[in-house]
Image (cartoon, rainbow, N blue to C red):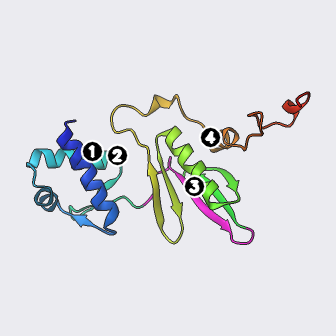
Amino acid sequence: MAKSADKLLHRLRAEYLETTGLRLTFEQVQRFCGVEPTMCQLVLDVLVDEKFLCVKSDGHYARLTHPDNDDVVVRQKSVKPSVYVLGMPSAPAQFQVRTRDEAVAQALAFAKHQHVRAWFADDEFVLLGTFRVSVGPRCAGRCKVSLDDIGRTLQPRNRWGDSSSASREGRP
């Protein structure tokens, strides 16, 4: 994609992120960006393919506000003590952490590894980050792991760089 298309992608993403509830028609996007119809459609198609935007039934382009089945979602399970749960809408697997920061960090790490999006569910879904690949197959099934696998790789490490107490035996 040309540099002008990259700039347009960045501009539209920024505009949709900054303006909550923004809904624009194709013609409005074209006028706003001052580009040819072909370039405008190309960029809108990329944003829809990345699932950053969706096309509403009335033809307006709007932010996608709900996770897909393979996205990772963070929810607060209890308030006192605080417990956050990471999960995927399509799978029962869940991973619990104690702090919001840790939950968000692990959700982002999982989403980046899986090339999906990370969400935080409060009163509504808030997109934390998107790591979707817009071109080519997403790992063709080779990189599918569970949240439990990611949780094990993200366990706190001791000063020797491992997470098991048995591996510390014999070390000073």
Q: Secondary structure at mark 4?
A: loop
The CA span between labels 1 and 2 is 6 Å
**Number of numbered discs visible in the structure rendering:** 4
| Residue 136 % position (x, y) | 35, 31
Q: Are marks 1 and 2 in contact (CB under 8 Å)?
A: yes
Q: Are marks 2 and 4 in contact (CB under 8 Å)?
A: no
The CA span between labels 3 and 2 is 21 Å
| Residue 80 % position (x, y) | 74, 72
Viewer-proximal residue, 138 or 155? 155
Identify residue for label 3: 104
The CA span between labels 1 and 3 is 26 Å
Q: Which mark is residue 46?
A: 1
What's drawn in magenta, residue-wise? 66-81
| Residue 9 % position (x, y) | 25, 48
Callout 1 amino acid: Val
Whichever of labels 4 and 1 marks the residue nearer the N terminus, that label is 1
Q: Which mark is residue 146?
A: 4
Identify residue for label 2: 50
